[in-house]
Amino acid sequence: MNFKVIFASLLVVVMSMSVAFASTNEIGTAVSRNLTMTKDRIIKVRAVDTISSQKIKQNAQVHFKVIEDIMIGDVVIVPVNTDVEAIITKIKKAGPWDKDGELEVTFSEVKTKDGQPIPVIGMLQLRGDKPQFLIKYSLFGVLVKGKEAVITAGKEVDLKIKEEVMIRMDNSLNESI
């Protein structure tokens, strides 16, 4: 009878442990760690749409996409195709004589997959082509309009991380860290 009590007790302990282990796997354990994104690291982005100095307005938002995964070790911080917003900070429409179009696009941040901002430095400045010198200063120059500034879809821009950033990663054991 003593043997039956010991066996029953061991059986209860083993079953309790398996239930506890199974519930831990289902719920997962939260793991948090900080990763450091270094200053001056380059993030490459690409224009989604064509942007023209003739059609866009000052302070308009324009969209770019991250070209490649941004990783720290084996952890993806910013996945490829993450949307990056930029602002049109300067615009001049093309006009007669020496009035070529100008565009200036300024970037301020890229967001991680968890929505944390990474401050960046980035600017894209373009001018349209100027008319030929002889035409520009002749009487016909008033009839010749300068060229608009155009950022074509697919134009690539390098953004530089402005300062060292601590990225907080919250994952469960069921996800790769």
Image: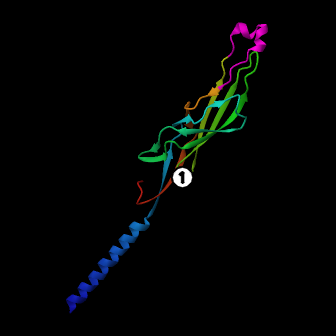
**Residue 97 placed where, x, y %?**
76, 15
Number of marks: 1
Q: Is residue 136 magenta?
A: yes
Q: Is residue 10 left or right of residue 125?
A: left
Q: Residue furthest bottom?
A: 1
Q: Residue furthest front?
A: 143
Q: Quadrant of the N terminus?
A: bottom left
* Residue 173 sits in quarter: bottom left
Magenta span of residues? 130-149
Which residue is painted at 24% across and 86% down in the image? 6
Q: Is residue 37 left or right of residue 86?
A: left
Element class at badge 1: loop
How is colour applied across the structure in the image? rainbow
Q: Is residue 102 magenta?
A: no
**Which amino acid type is marked by label 1?**
Asp
The one nearer the camera, 158 or 138, is 138
The one nearer the camera, 21 or 127, is 127
Which residue is painted at 73% across and 18% down in the image? 145
Which residue is painted at 57% across and 50% down in the image? 116
* Residue 49 sits in quarter: top right
Which residue is painted at 79% across and 8% down in the image? 139
Q: Residues within 10 Å of mark 1 (few under 14, many from 20)?
A: few
Label 1 belongs to which residue? 114
**Residue 126 placed where, x, y %?**
64, 25
**Residue 152 placed where, x, y %?**
59, 29
